[in-house]
Image: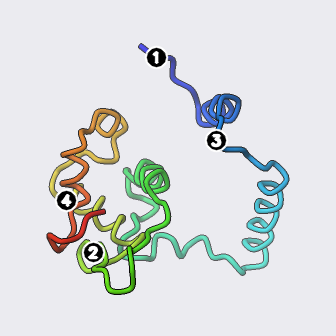
Amino acid sequence: MAPKLLPAASAELIVRNARHITVHEEAIEKLSDHVIRGIKEKEINIENFSQHEHHPSAKDPHAANWIFLIDTLNFCFWTPGVDATKWKVNGQTGYFALCAAVNRAMQEGIDITNPAYYSKITVEQLESILRSDTEDTKA
């Protein structure tokens, strides 16, 4: 069995061994300061996250694992050309389509926020979870 690392130790291991990415410590500090200032000055409202229909409530027992999964899968969503059909899930596109797909999987009884499940997920299972509202688009 592989040793389990806490998030900070995992990040350190990745950064130490990464060949194609770098972490800019100064930028992290600058962003952290900006976020903290924004929260203190009420420019950023931390309550807004759970107010969106596709986000879990703070009391949801799956919330932390849901956020981790979404943050891991979230990346820039590009449509290949102006006339291309966008990937949609429950009528949503982009980031909110990802949220809707994960929520739909949970409603279907798929334990998608459980690391034990998604660490062994197959391509076919993930394709089914991320399936579009239309057959001619893929995530």
CA separation in Å, label 2 and label 1: 37 Å
On the image, the x and y values in percent for residue 111 come to 25, 45
Type of amino acid under label 2 = Lys
Tell me which numbered mark, 1 or 3, is placed earlier along the sequence: 1
State the residue in front, 78 or 13.
78
Type of amino acid under label 4 = Gln
Q: How many marks?
A: 4
Residue under label 4, please give it.
107
CA separation in Å, label 1 and label 4: 31 Å
Residue under label 1, please give it.
2
Q: Residues within 10 Å of mark 4 (few under 14, many from 20)?
A: few
* Residue 43, above or below 104: below
Name which residue lies at 36% across and 65% down: 99
CA separation in Å, label 1 and label 3: 24 Å
Residue under label 3, please give it.
20
Q: Is residue 40 left or right of residue 131?
A: right
Residue under label 2, please give it.
88
Q: Is residue 116 left or right of residue 8?
A: left
Task: Find out whether the residues at labels 4 and 2 contact each other: C-beta distance under 8 Å.
Answer: no
* Residue 74, above or below 69: below
Q: Secondary structure at mark 3?
A: loop
**Disc 1 or disc 4, which is closer to the eye?**
1
